[in-house]
Amino acid sequence: MDALLLHSPALEPAVHESIESALREVDHLQRTLATLLQIALAESGAPLASPASVDVSELACELVELFEPVARERGLTLVSKHEGAAVVHGNRQLLAQLITNLIENCLKYVPSGGALEVGVQRFADCVRLTVRDNGPGMVADDRVRAVQPFVRVAQNGKPDSSGLGLSLVAAIARLHRARLALESNDPGLRVVIDLPLET
């Protein structure tokens, strides 16, 4: 129905643009609602759904490969760095969402010519996921506030930002009993998540 309306030759250009704008807003609201539901589920205290062995290195590489063409189109360099298998017990879909949100955050705010790196390291007691960029970064106070729902800090002030991306990352990290830290990459932002080997 939407496609038929948009491609109708009888539509005036102004009407066509109004419909497109309305559809974009509906899509944005749907994505915001879906994110809120995910946060509510993660914060509900319910046990982790569908836990399984997840190789975070493999998952990160898959997502970097998926987003690399988008980064290249925006004039950004996106690479992955890992040291072999790094397996945790968790929900693969949620961990994929976590990494996706971090990559998308970098893609949105790092200017052309910038660089993004997704790294995975295995330690004796945890798997460390690090997503870093050399973009505008955040001041210390904003790094604390950025993981709260609907908070838009300096780098998140664009009109299309809902202020939910990093709060969902924080909720998923808590659900996996992981430690989350937002640090200065000098320049840029570095997000460090330590996932316990067993949850």
Image: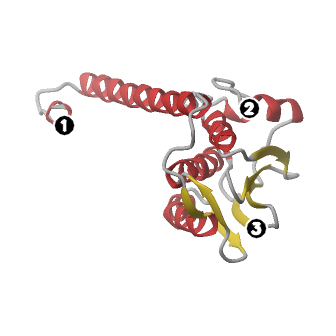
Residue 119 quadrant: bottom right
| Residue pointed to by mark 1 | 3
Front of the two marks 1 and 2: 2
Which residue is pictured at 74% across the width and 55% down the height? 196
Front of the two marks 3 and 2: 3
- Label 3 and label 2: CA atoms lie apart by 25 Å
40 to 95, vertically: above or below: above
Residue 160 quadrant: top right
Which residue is pictured at 52% across the width and 55% down the height? 92
Image position, residue 139 (x, y; %): 86, 36
Left or right position of 21 against 150 = left
Q: Amino acid at mark 2?
A: Ala
Q: Quick one: label 3, few (<14), some, or many (20+) residues within 10 Å?
A: some
Given residues 127 and 141, the one toward you in this image is 127
**Residue 76: in sight, yes or no?**
no
| Residue pointed to by mark 3 | 121
| Residue pointed to by mark 2 | 146
Disc on the earlier residue, 1 or 3: 1
Image position, residue 194 (x, y; %): 76, 53
Residue 26 quadrant: top left
Q: Name the outermost residue toward the bottom.
A: 84
- Marks 1 and 2: CB-CB under 8 Å? no
Disc on the earlier residue, 3 or 2: 3
- Label 1 and label 3: CA atoms lie apart by 46 Å
| Label 3 secondary element | strand
Numbered badge on residue 20 = none
Query: Quarter of the image containing the N terminus?
Result: top left
Q: Amino acid at mark 1?
A: Ala
Disc on the earlier residue, 1 or 2: 1
Given residues 193 and 123, the one toward you in this image is 123
